[in-house]
Image: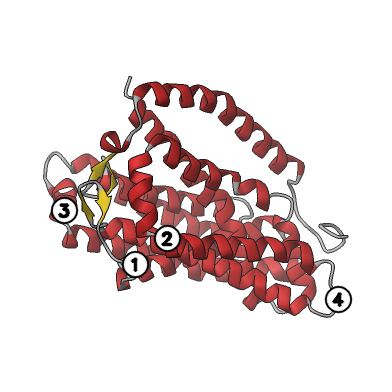
Amino acid sequence: MDYALIWAILIAIAVFAYVALDGFDLGVAMLFPWFRKENHRDIMMNTVAPVWDGNETWLVLGGGGLLAVFPLAYAVLMPALYMPVIAMLLGLIFRGVAFEYRFKTKTSKHLWDLSFILGSLVAALSQGIMLGAMLQGIKVVDRAYAGGWFDWLTWFSLFCGIAVVIGYALLGATWLVMKTEGELQRRSYGLAFRFALALVACIAFVSLYLPWRSSAIADRWFSFPASIWLWILPLVLAGVTIGLLRALKQRRHVSPYLWSLGLFLVAFLGFAVSIFPYLVPRAITLWDAAAPDNSLVFLLVGAVILLPIIFAYTGYTYWVFRGKVREDSGYHD
């Protein structure tokens, strides 16, 4: 069995699960500037308060799995991305503190609102910058990072950071559509529509820029007829976009969030296809980076036991807190 490939798939699932689940609560926080009423902000926080910390389980699983299973990739990526990783962690810390303190203060609630917004914004922007830095390539010499402190900071990585912020805002808006009602829900429909158009434009730009910049990616996507099956993904992206916009116009409650996840999934698959089989694009493959097979098997046994448990308690949590969140219910002292 190809244990390195199995683990690459598992870590990819963990990363996507993090984006799908933690993305919407980061997005809800970044939508605060569009909702000035205190009761609206209370409801927005209450929609994510029961689940936000459990969502970050997937971030730990993805990062810890990378260290344990692909130590060489971890050793290269961390020095290359130290600053955005630290910024992301600080942002998540400030956001987490804001959850607890905002409901317990009377005079400085606006400061914790600001902490909630900025912490989430910094975390989302940092994740997008890391994605952009990986897609544009990382300098590796003799299986070690050979770049400088600020190689991650380019116009393309910043563009990817902004794209992720827009994407998370879309997830947050569609989450609010699903979990709220009244004026808050009506305004969320309009925000979701605008963010959806902006995100699709960002995905289209990156999808065109990467083949133009990299001949290897261009060969993968445009070497006909071998690459014809890959063009299913752009067609699916178009279909998902139409489905999302139609669901928003028809004022659906649940399907806009699911269609938004579909946008992320198609983009995620497209970028994975572009860089496969590299963990560090054009430098280190997943087989080069993998730990010995006996280590992978040992870790896989633990994953087979733990992953169903994580899926079960995550699903149970969302089931318990299903339905609309109203002003008279939620997270209080």
SS at mark 3 in the image: helix
Whole-Å distance between the Cαs marked 2 and 1?
A: 8 Å
Q: CA–CA distance between discs 4 and 2?
A: 37 Å
Which of the marked residues, 3 or 2, is nearer the chain's N terminus?
A: 2
Of residues 199 and 244, which is closer to you in this image? 199
Q: Which of the two marks, 3 or 1, is nearer to us in this view?
A: 1
Q: Considering the numbered disc 4 on the image, is that residue within a helix, a strand or a loop? A: loop
Position above or below: 222 against 122? above
Q: CA distance from mark 3 to mark 2?
A: 30 Å
Q: CA distance from mark 3 to mark 1?
A: 29 Å
Relative depth, front residue between 282 and 77: 77
Location of the C terminus (image quadrant)? bottom right
Q: Quadrant of the N terminus?
A: top left
Assess whether mark 1 and mark 2 are in contact (beta carbons under 8 angstroms): yes
Left or right? Give the position of 124 relative to 132. right
Q: Is residue 116 left or right of residue 137?
A: right
Element marked by disc 2: helix
Report which residue position mark 3 lands on: 218
Q: Amino acid at mark 4?
A: Lys
Q: Is residue 187 visible?
A: no
Residue at the spot 53% in from the left edge and 68% down from the top edge: 122
What residue do we see at 49% from left, 56% from top? 244
Can you tell which quarter of the image residue 96 is in?
A: bottom right
**Residue kind at label 2, given as amino acid type:** Tyr
Q: Which residue is mark 2?
A: 82
Q: Residues within 10 Å of mark 3 (few under 14, many from 20)?
A: some
Cα–Cα gap, marks 4 and 1 = 42 Å
Q: Is residue 268 left or right of residue 251?
A: left
Q: CA distance from mark 4 to mark 3?
A: 56 Å
